[in-house]
Image (cartoon, grey):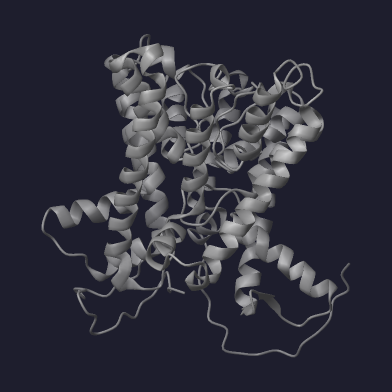
Amino acid sequence: MINWQANVYPKQFSGVKCRKRQKINPPLVLTIGFIVLIMLGTGLLMLPMASTQPISWLDALFTATSAVTVTGLVVIDTGTDLTVFGQSVVMLLIQIGGIGFMTVAVISILSLGKTLGLQQRLLASRAFDTNDLTSVIKVAKYVLVYSLVIESVAFCLLFISWFDDYGALKSAYHSLFYTISAFNNAGFALSGDSLSAFKGDITVNVVITALFIIGGLGFTVLIDIYKQKRWSLLSTNTRLVLIATLVLNCIAFILIFFFEHANPTTLAPLSTSEQILTAWFQAVTPRTAGFNTLPIDGLSQDSTLLTMLLMVIGGGSVSTASGIKLGTFVILILAMRSYLKQQTTVTVFNRQLSDKLVIKALSVMILYLFIAFTSIMIITKLEQGSLLDITFEAISALSTVGLSRGITGDLSAPSQLIIILLMLIGRVGPLTFAYCFARQHSQPLTYPTTSIQIG
């Protein structure tokens, strides 16, 4: 793992210019980078040409934050309150926020014919979650190319599907907007009811869900699949993410169909084929996609609780998704299994996980829960709404999902500011955000072991 506050850098490093040695805190720099991007987006959305009617600075800030953090929570109607210019700003912010502004920064530096210094590589390596400083340029290129290729294919499929209904120009624009929004797990839509009008459209359901599932796997997983091409050669992380994604999606689909098939406000009025498509869409969207084809406030309590659990889990690391991340969730499950079996190590696929990795996963979970419950308590004190609605909103924001039970626009200014902060924390990651304020302390001494009763 990279020393994020390192004072000592290698004297020689292939392809890296070692300049003045100084402290660097990548988590803080990354967080500031997101904040700067949000401020720029807010300024652009405040321009008269960005909206059909004047919007407040808070609405602009909320929208820009939601776009940069690829959340999808909205306080204004993207399709009617924003002009084409304003919607284009949202698309640009989603794209940069989804693939990561460090990817854009690295590609921009290279396109200008410049080289990356050591500090720049340290920042990029933190963003890409890799310890190999020599690979950051390749990873950035892979991320950009994969994003453009996948989005191009999806754009063509959606364009063909919508051509007869919308015509060439409108079909192209809608296809571009929804492709970028879906692949980056943003959930922004040009209609107030999201994609509810397409609940029976096979092409739209398959393409949109494929986009946010692929985007939520993680770029390191996609790179590994491209390079290895054989299951036996894939890394442990890749195999774990693929299996866990499949299992979670299938379980969620079965449960949503079972919970909602008789619900008159959701699946009951639909045909069998529409029920299957809609249940599938609703099952896979909570893991940070943000689109919906069912009214979220019409879901049964069973489905609502399941949706919140899926939002907490989120997608893969180094992806366009957030949450505690799929790897974190699986590691905690494996750790619990090992303890119940009275095993001294945590293993997966005949590989042993380090104690440090297990502690990191536990830290992410505890930080997430602490931030979530603290924000829920504060918002509950500020608002008079339902505890279920507020909890759902807070988790959706922290997991950068974008699903809502309809209270976003009704929240007071202080509560909206809390949601904005939650979206930012969710995008950079609770642990990364905590590292912005934490100081590293060496522990040269070892102490006698002791025991504390638990369980």
Q: Left or right: 164 with respect to 284?
A: left
Q: Is residue 23 left or right of residue 249?
A: left
- x then y, percent, for residue 257: 75, 33
- Spot occupied by residue 199 in the image (x, y as percentages of width and height): 59, 22
- 121 sits to left or right of 349: left
Up-down relation of residue 59 to residue 343 (above or below)? above
| Residue at figure coordinates x 37%, y 56% from the top left | 29
The reply to whether residue 46 is in sight is: no
Is residue 260 or residue 317 the one in the foreground?
260
Between residue 272 and residue 405, name the one nearer to us: 272
In the visual, does 207 lie left or right of 52? right
- Occupied quadrant, residue 164: top left
Counting from the top left corner in percent of width and height, residue 307 is at 70, 38
**Figure quadrant of the C terminus:** bottom right
Task: Identify the residue shown where x is 70% and y is 89%.
Answer: 447
Q: Please count the marks in the image.
A: 0
**Based on the displayed image, in which of its 4 quarters is residue 174 positioned?**
top left
Residue placed farthest to the top in the image?
Answer: 53
Q: Is residue 269 visible?
A: yes
| Residue at (51, 54) in percent of width and height | 433
- Given residues 161 and 380, the one toward you in this image is 161
Foreground pick, 76 / 201 = 201
Q: Position of residue 166 (x, y in %)?
A: 37, 13
Quadrant of residue 387 within the rendered picture? top right
Q: Give the vertical position of 46 relative to 144 (above or below).
A: above
The residue lying at 70 percent from left, 19 percent from top is 271
